[in-house]
Amino acid sequence: MGALMSMIFGKAQVEVFVTTGDRQGAGTDANVWLCIVDDLGNVTPDVLLDNLLQNDHERGQTYSYPIWKLGEMKGKVHKVVVWRDEAGIGDHWFLDRVEVEDRRRNTRHVFPLQRWVKPHVRYTMYEHHSFLPQHEPQLEMRREELEEKRKTFEYAARFNKGPLQVATLPADEAFSAKYMLDFLSLKGALMAQTMYLRLTTERWTSLEDLKNVYLENSQLYMPKVANMWMDDEWFGRQRVQGVNPVLITLCQEIPEKFGVTDEMVEPFLEGLTLEQALQKNKIFITDLEMLDGILCKDSGLPLVSPIALFYLNKAEDIMPLAIQLFQQKAPDNPVFLPSDPKYTWILAKMFYNMAEAQHHQSSTHLGLTHLLMEGICVCTHRHISPSHPLFKLLAPHFLYLLAINSRGLAKLIQPGGWVDTGMTVGIRGMFSLIEKSYLAWSFTKHGILPNEVKSRGVYDASILPYYPYRDDGEDLFLCIRKYVFNVVTHFYDDPDKIANDYELQAWREELVRPRSEGGLELQDVPGSNGRFETADEIAETMTVLVSTCSLGHAAANFQQYEAYGFIPNFPGKLTGAPPTDKQELGEADIMKYLPNKKETLDIMVITKLLSMKGTKSLGDFEVQYLYDPHSIQAAEEFRLDLRRLSHVIEERNLKRKHMYDWLNPKIVPNSISI
């Protein structure tokens, strides 16, 4: 009908474009009406949004509707009112936005709703539709909506003292059909590639036998580390650009519990004494004390909790000096050295990496990105309206977070699941480590990347020249901070706006409230006197959330296959007791410690799946939430900054011995979706 009218009368003076959201069940068969209100209070006649011979309002689609009868509307387009009935087989409808093209004034106006539209309820949509609660023109509806969301987004405590999670996954938070199809298709293909090997003998006979598992030109290719995993230089490099680059610390004094002596390590110090090397800031340490007291799942033996010492040599490489597998000195807890028999030293490094793998998966990856952010995401839904500019700022970075956590816990972290079979600690040990890391996590110390790096004494490039995680990570963090501050300070340009924003203040209060009283009990959330008082405090908090969901997760996640995919390099699991002496070993001896073929193949498949990038790159948002001109400009500047940084990192990689691309903005997604 619209096309016919256009042929007869020419273009309508006003045309409306209606976009249905791209989520499960978003489309509707109901009748939908709209009217437009101008700035003088005049209203157009009601318009039925129905194109002849067209199935309107389908999921993820935009449909246009010319408005021929403007009635008394003479002024500027001010707001839009939309409502629907219950007609049709499927009447539910998720409206993303309405755009109004006013050809009288050559203007275009965007009215985002981004909600489910209830039948017979009139939804008034204002341009850009972004309000602090004290400025909300539909306050009662907003309050009722949040009350409903608090019933939908309830907490569940699945850990004794760990992060809170959502009790039941809301339907709105589920994966899209396309995302699930892509994920399951890749999983099926990977399982098919490994099926024939699962029917052969259980154990690997040699390293060459293990290497035969990899298939050329397939998803399960041989990781580059397969040809350098034994090298001390690579072992050191994993501390600064590996999957868990958050442990390396400047050592200024050898701990009493570490049985290292000058005589042990001086042959590797290029003519320096140990004391001289310490004074020159050339000694570094990693200490996995967190693992002390955790038991191995299968054997019931104590998990190793190693300490490792490293030296910055003249070539500016971090080289391992010594490894002690347990925390306290003892006759059966030797200090392993590079001068030990070849495979004895290699086995010590394997046990160290196995221990760090438990820390990586439990703390750095699952505990302090996935689960930490889940509780904060739930808190956001409970207290901050979808109309709030801060909800709109955070929403792209929470995409699929609850869905992947729900699926991960169901498939991977259950008795008999992948963690139980592919990780030395099993699920009980992992839960204990998650609780420890959560209790120790601080917003300002650990959530702000430059602060975290400074806390370990390795922020200064003159002390640790080669540290790709620090260098690329800080640059990306500063890009995120600039964008977030730009948006936040625009909406909070007056201290009164902060003081009167009761949604924001209630959100912060629940973040810090003790768990025993229904809060998340997070430490060091920015603020003063139990409240946010400045825009900088709000922006710093939001920066931590955006960066953790993007940068933090990317650094811990996307090179998992490269690290774990060749099992001896970074073994998620080793079987048998750790060495208690330095007797000479051979290749056959270390093969006995590796997981069997089925477990190995499962580790390869799962870490490949976990390395899959499921959503768009940072700044390229799947859904646009903020439409005001300032926020649009801020997002454009953000994307420009990210493109520039991407080029800088590509230039750095040309000079690096081993490429570190995991914090290139092209690689980093917006959210934790895998």
Image (spheres, rainbow, N blue to C red):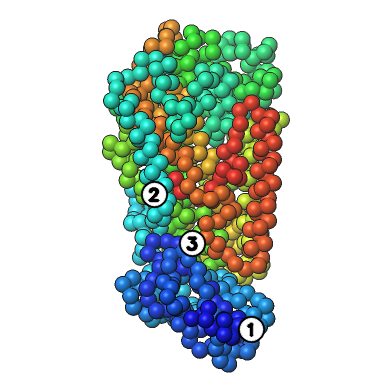
Residue to which mark 1 is pinned: 76
Q: Where in the figure is residue 411, as x and y percent of width and height? A: 33, 43
Q: Of circles 1 and 2, which is in front?
A: 2
Q: Amino acid at mark 2?
A: Leu
User: Which residue is found at the position 41% from the left and 55% from the top?
Assistant: 176
Q: Amino acid at mark 1?
A: Lys
Cα–Cα span, label 1 and label 2: 45 Å
In this picture, residue 619 sits left or right of residue 121: right
Name the quarter where the C terminus is drawn: top left
As drawn, the residue found furthest toward the bottom would be: 72
In this picture, residue 615 sits left or right of residue 120: right
> Which is nearer the N-term, disc 3 or disc 1?
1
Residue to which mark 2 is pinned: 181
Residue to which mark 3 is pinned: 507
As drawn, the residue found furthest toward the right would be: 462
**For residue 27, above or below residue 602:** below
**For residue 323, above or below residue 126:** above
Q: Where in the figure is residue 159, as x and y percent of width and height? A: 35, 46
User: Which residue is found at the position 56% from the left and 29% from the top?
Assistant: 239
Q: Where in the figure is residue 374, as x and y percent of width and height? A: 43, 52
